[in-house]
Structure formats: structure tokens, C-alpha cells
Amino acid sequence: MPPVITLEKLTKSYGKSRGIIDVDLEVQQGEVFGFLGPNGAGKTTTIRTMLDLIRPTSGRAAVFGIESSADPVAIHRRVGYIPGEFTLYDRLTGRQTLEYFANLRGGVDPAYQASLVERFELETGKRFKEYSKGNKQKVGVIAALQHRPELLILDEPTSGLDPLVQQTFFTTLRDAVADGATVFLSSHILSEVEKTCERVAIIRDGRIVKLGTVEGLRDLAHHQVEMRFAGAVPSDTFARLPGVSDVVAEDHVLRLRVAGAITPVVRAAAQFELLDFVSREPSLEETFLAEYGREAVGAGANGR
Amino acid sequence: MAASAGTPRHPAATLSTIPLRRRLYGLGSIYGKTIRDSRLSFIIAAGLFGGLALALGAAIGTVFPTPETRKELGTLVGSMPAAMVNLFGNVTLMGAKMGTLGGYVTWKYGSLFTLGTALWSILALSGTLAGEAAKGSLDIVAVSPFGKRRIAIEKVAAHLTLVWVALAVLAVMQTVSSNAFGDASLGDQIPLAASAAFSVWVAATALFFGGLTLVLAPLLGRAGSAGVSALAMLLAWMASGLGVGGPLLGLDPFHWTENNVPLVQIYDWGGVLAVAAVGALLTAVGIELFNRRDLGVTSGLSMPSLPAGLLGVRGPVSRAFGDQVPRALSWGIGLAIWGALLASLVGSFSDTIGKDPGLLTAFRSIFPGYDFTTAGGWLQLYLELFLIVAGFAAATFVSKWASDETDGRLELVLATPMARARWVIAGGIGALLAVLLATVMWTVGIGIGASAGGGTIGDALLGSASFGLVAAAFVGVGVAVGGVWRTSLAAEVTAVLVVVTYLIDLLAPPLNLPDWFHQLALTAHMGQPMIGVWDPVGVVACVVLAVGGIALGAWGVTRRDIAR
């Protein structure tokens, strides 16, 4: 089965400022794909190019096998999209806004629309300008889901939603996936991606720097190990081991970071009298921060 | 150690001093930032004021160069019904001075400067606090270490500074113009003190209605306060000019200053002072209301909503039109009142003129080509102003269409199966329907006014379509600019073209500029539609610009990136 999204050497430059450079990735049908990166790394530029809202400087973006700039309407017919930032018609109520987008698309099941409204507890009688940020986001979420799209492209979809509504959102997303939808989820909230996605790409300074399964990314990452010794801490023994770094000794406690296999550390530890041994599997967030740290946060200041 | 709750945890850092220059213009203060943000409107206003003062001096000096023509002018104006002449300046009080440059400018254009400047204040002062509060941007400013009162004072002060500087430009240019183009022997020269007094009157009136807007803004929000203040201004101007309203005239700032005609050196400082004092009081109350009320929360007395059917959710065209309806209704109501007023006056006037061959000859010698025996002929005389208003109305419709992209809605709209070109075409049609609605309301106003005044204006009813044609042409130009280039500049470019068109049409004949130059103005090709004389070239040009502009915009938008 051909991929739902194919990006090949996709590049977009904004004159002097950087956009994205040589982005390559594929998303398969039924997949929940996470797109991670710090602010300004190029996530939104990638999405907007996929939807033909902006045109690539070079390279190719195809959705459902259709070149995005060749027939964007055919793509949009099958897509639900939540932009990172949006506004809607101030004078229309929530109900009228949803009705308008339903009319633009056609084929929206009123019962399903009503079920979404109920599920997200949206007060549809208020005018859009009277809504709180979270309720405005709910309108965007329902507008993106109400036509049961084959592909959901979500750019920071939970922005402004409270934790309970976020939970509702992810439940709804899982239902959509169970119905066969594909999801492209852009976020900088790593826990959100970790809970939801199967594969993840990390973009930095406009380039894809990591691409793989969530588990795979974790495996690529380090383990945090903490050992409590009965006697003196043998720091040197561990510091020499392959993949070990950031060795810190404090009283009888030794903390270190292990990249790759943890076996050499376990074998070395077995030679000493240990009171405690804790190896913690890192979260994706820790992986991300360890990989990019502060540098990543400061990166993309010039990007979009 | 317990920290005192009232003491900052860290000693105040030594901050570098902000240069005075940046406090006055730039990012050094709220005042400086407001000045900086308003620079475009200031440049437009000051340029328009200065340019008009120069142009009017040149035009009047050329059209009425001799004592005889001035006498004819005096006869012409003096023969008009008092209700009509005093609407545009106190002719009765001016007497023989009506024949001077200052008198003529006061009579024909004085109210234009006053109403225009007051409208500027209404729009600016409704937007600077209520508009920003509604958008949320004021929340961030309001949590800076300044009180809300100070924020309001700095913002209002910045606007007033710009108004006063623009009016200073007007005063200087009026004096320069009268000395350069006027005839001293005919009493044309306007002393700087007189020009300055005119500007002071304009500034006081603008302060009055700007202050009223500030008072209303916390209650009605931006659009409501601007709409109510603008309507109040228009009604007050007409009530004073027509002498209607009974005891309510006591509340009318135009009535308070009706004996103030500074450009012919007739002053009523008491009236001007009263307007300025009430304006200052209203402004102070508005600032205090802003200080005391919740930020961005209006009283719930917001403007009534449109019926759901008019909001348009069926498809892109109905939605585009639904978005335009409030603007179209605002323009339509204002134009209908203005049109009704003129039409009610010109009917009886044309009858009077028709019965006096001597007077008719005098009028025809000054305004060749106009048929003053019909109400339509008189309306034609004012059509040029209406056509400029049509251009500005078109610019606001273009602005509304453009807001889909500039406000960030377009991304969601285009993520549906709607092609970019379809969005432009639907938006263009929506704007054209808005033009149609405003034109119909204007026409109805003219019809009602003519019926009330006993005039017959059959041709003028059809001729009012010229308003719609010109507006449609400017819509086409704006949509083309927005589609091909960028929507964020579409309305501004349209407005500039409207001003340029007006100036070319106004200045080219009296300054004897080449005919081809005059022909560049679209309004020079409209014929005299109010008396049934149409110029096919103008009609075709309008249709081509409207349809071609939208088509060009639809083509252009497919070739560029969509802005966020």
C-alpha cells in the first residue's frame, strides 16, 4: 500500500531566513506519526507545504499519492486539519461555524457532529469571539474531525485544552485511528507524542535529525543508572566502560549515564557489594532534552 | 528569615536610560509606540490636509479669478435656500466675505475637514483601547508596571499629538495656498492666525467626538462605539446645518460653533472653548471608565446581531457576503441619510432656479455643463464626492475580504475542498454584493428625500448606479492587489488609488494639466449619470476593472504562498 504522506527532499526557504531543508519522510496508512521539534524548527512549514498553503522551493510533497501543489483540493477533501494558530468568524456562533465548515466539505453526518459536540462539551450557542481560548480550540478540533477524514494533520492540537479535554481528544483520536484514519501529529509536548504515536521524526533547524519508532528512539538513548555501594565508590572502574558518561560520585552513591547496551555496567557492578541498583528507562522527553538540551531550545529562533 | 511581602526579592537593577527620542517615537514608551503605530494614518491625513489646502487654493484662484466671477459666486450661494447653504457653512454670517477664498473653502469644504478629522479620532480612539482590549494585546501591556489610567492617557495623548500636528500642517498650507494662489485685492489672503483658528475648531470638534467614543467604548466595544459616535456626528452636523432638532440643538457641538467662521476672520471663541471643554471632559471620563472597568469586558450593550439567515453559512459566497453585511449596512445607512438630505433640498431649489433665467445663466457660467433645472443636475454636482466615498467604501469591503488571510482564518478555510481561486472569486462576489446593498440603500435614500422635497429625480435614481460601478471597480482593483501580491496591503493600496483619483479629477482641469492626465481618473469617465447622461467608456472600464480584477486576483493567489 502506498504511503499516505511522502516528502522527498522537501525544501522551503523564505528568502534570507531558513524554512526546511531536504526533509524526507513517509507516513503509512493507519499510522500515528509524531513530528517533534523545538519552537521554530520547521514543523509548521512542513505541514503548510504538505497542504499546499505554501509552495516548496524544491523537492516534493505528496499526500495520498497526489502532489500537493498539483491537486490540493483532492487532498483537502480527505484531510482534517488543525492549525497551530487560527481564528474564525467572530460573529458566527460555534454551531454556525461548524455548520459552515460542514457545508464547505459536504457529507458530514449531523449525528456524528452532535456526538463530537457532546463529547467535547462545547457550548455551541456562543459567538466565536466570546469563547475562551480552550473553547475556540474545541471548535477547531470538531471542525477537523466532523467529516471523519482519512488523514488528520494536527499542529499542536491540544494547545489551550485542559487535561480532561486533552484526554477526551486523545480518546477520540484513538477511535479515529481504529476506524482507519492516519494521524500526523506535530507537537513539542513530548509526553503527548510518546503516549500517542508509533513512529516519530525529530526536526531541528529545518532538517530531520532522527526518524524511528518511539521505542527505537528510546533505545538509541541513554539509561540513567544509580548505584549505592556498601563501601567506597569505584568511579574509575565505571568511567572506563564503553558508553558511560556523566559519572558523578556522591558519598556512597554513583550516578552515570549509559548509551547503548547496559550489560558492561551490570557486569562491573557485580564485582562490588551493592546496596541498591536502579536503572531507569528514559522517557522520550529525556531523550529529546539529552540530545538537544538548551541548544535545541535556542535553535530555531530564526525558523518558522 | 521571612521576606517582607511588600519588598521586591531582588534589588532594582540599574537600567540604562531610555533616550527621549525613543520615548517620543519608537519603543521607548507607550506614547512613542502609539505614535509609531499611527504613522501611516498620520502621513495620509497630513498629506491629504496639506494637499487639499494647496489644491483648493489653486483651483479657486483659477476658476474664480475676477471680481465679477466672485460676485456671481456670491449670487449663486446667496440664492440657495438657507437650509442648504448653512449646512456647509454659515453663509448668512459671512455675507460678502463668501466671495473670498477663505469663504468659499469654508462653505464647500470646511465640513469635510471637520467631519474627516472627527472620524479619524473616532476610529483611532475606538481601536486604540477597546479594539486592543478585545484582541487581548492590551492584557500584556496592562501587566507592565503602569496603571491602566496611564496607559490610556499615553495612548490618547499620542493620537491627539498626531491630530494636532496634521492640523498644524493644514493651517500652514492654507495660509501658504491663499498667499500663493489668491488675490489680495479680493481679500483672499488668509492670515496664519485665522488658519490656526480654523484648525483649533476642527481639533476641538474631533476631541468632542473622540471623547464620546472613549466614553462609549467600555460599554459598546470597538465597533459599537465607533458606529454610534459616527452616527451622532453626522446627525449633529445635519441638525445644526438645517436648524432642526428643537431643544436638542443645545447639545449639538456644531450648533455651539455655528457663528465661528475663522477662515474669514469671524471668531466665536466661546463656542469653540465650550466644544473643547466638553471634549476634554468626555475624554477624561472615558479614560477613567477604562481605568475602573474590567479590561476587554463590555457591558453587554453590544450592537444587535444580524439574523442567522444573513450571516451566511451555506457556502463561500454567502459567507463572504454575510461577513460584509454589517459594513454594507453602515455605509448604506450613512449614505442614505446623506442622499436623502441632499435630494430633499435640491428638488425645491431646482424649481426656483428654473423660474429665474438670470440666475440660471449665472449658475451655468460658473458650472458649465450642469442642468440646474433638475434635481438630478444638482445631485450631479455632488456626485464627485459620493464617488470618492464609493471608493473608500470599496476599500473597507476589500479590507474585510482580506481579513480572511490577515486574521488567520484562511488556513482552515483552504484546508477544506475549496480551491484558492474559488475563495477569491467568492470573496469578490461577496464584496460586490455589499456594494450593491450600499448602493440600493443610497438610492432609496435619494428617492425618499426627493419625495419629501417634491423633486422629480427619475434619472438620478438610475444614475445612482454610478456609485455602485465605481465602488465595484475599486473592489476589483483591491482584490487583484490582494490576490496577486498580498492581502495585508490590498485595502491600503485601494484607498491610496481612491485619493489619487480624486486629486487628479479635482486638480487637472483648474491647473490646466494635460487632458490625458485627467483621463487617468476613473471618475472623469462617468459622464453625468444623475441626469441620464452616461459615458459608455466609464461603464465598460468599471465592469472590466471589477470582473478583471477579481479574475486577476483568483489567478494570482494560486501562484503565491498563503500568509499565516
Image (cartoon, helix red, strand yellow):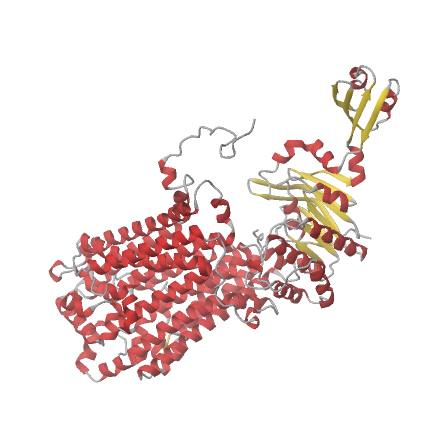
Residue B89 vertical placement versus B9 (above, below):
below
Provide residue B502's location: percent of width, then percent of height. Answer: 34, 62
Tell which residue pokes out farthest to the left in this image: B185
Residue A107 vertical placement versus A56 (above, below):
below
Q: Quadrant of residue B17?
A: top left
Residue B535 vertical placement versus B493 (above, below):
below
Q: Nearer the viewer, residue A99 or B357?
A: A99
Q: Residue at x 32, y 75 (%)?
A: B342
Q: Is residue B120 visible?
A: no
Provide residue B545's location: percent of width, then percent of height. Answer: 46, 66
Q: Nearer the viewer, residue B9 or A135?
A: B9
Q: Looking at the image, how many numbered discs can be counted on the residues?
A: 0
Q: Quadrant location of the C terminus of chain A?
A: top right
For residue B105, side relative to residue A287 (left or right): left
For residue B539, side relative to residue B276 (left or right): right
Residue B171 vertical placement versus B10 (above, below):
below
Q: Quadrant of residue A297?
A: top right
Q: Residue at x 25, y 55 (%)?
A: B200
Q: Is residue A88 visible?
A: yes
Provide residue B118's location: percent of width, then percent of height. Answer: 34, 59
Q: Residue at x 54, y 64 (%)?
A: B427
Q: Nearer the viewer, residue B89 or B431?
A: B89
For residue A110, side relative to residue B105 (left or right): right
Q: Quadrant of residue A280?
A: top right
Provide residue A69's location: percent of width, then percent of height. Answer: 66, 54
Q: Nearer the viewer, residue A255 or B75?
A: A255
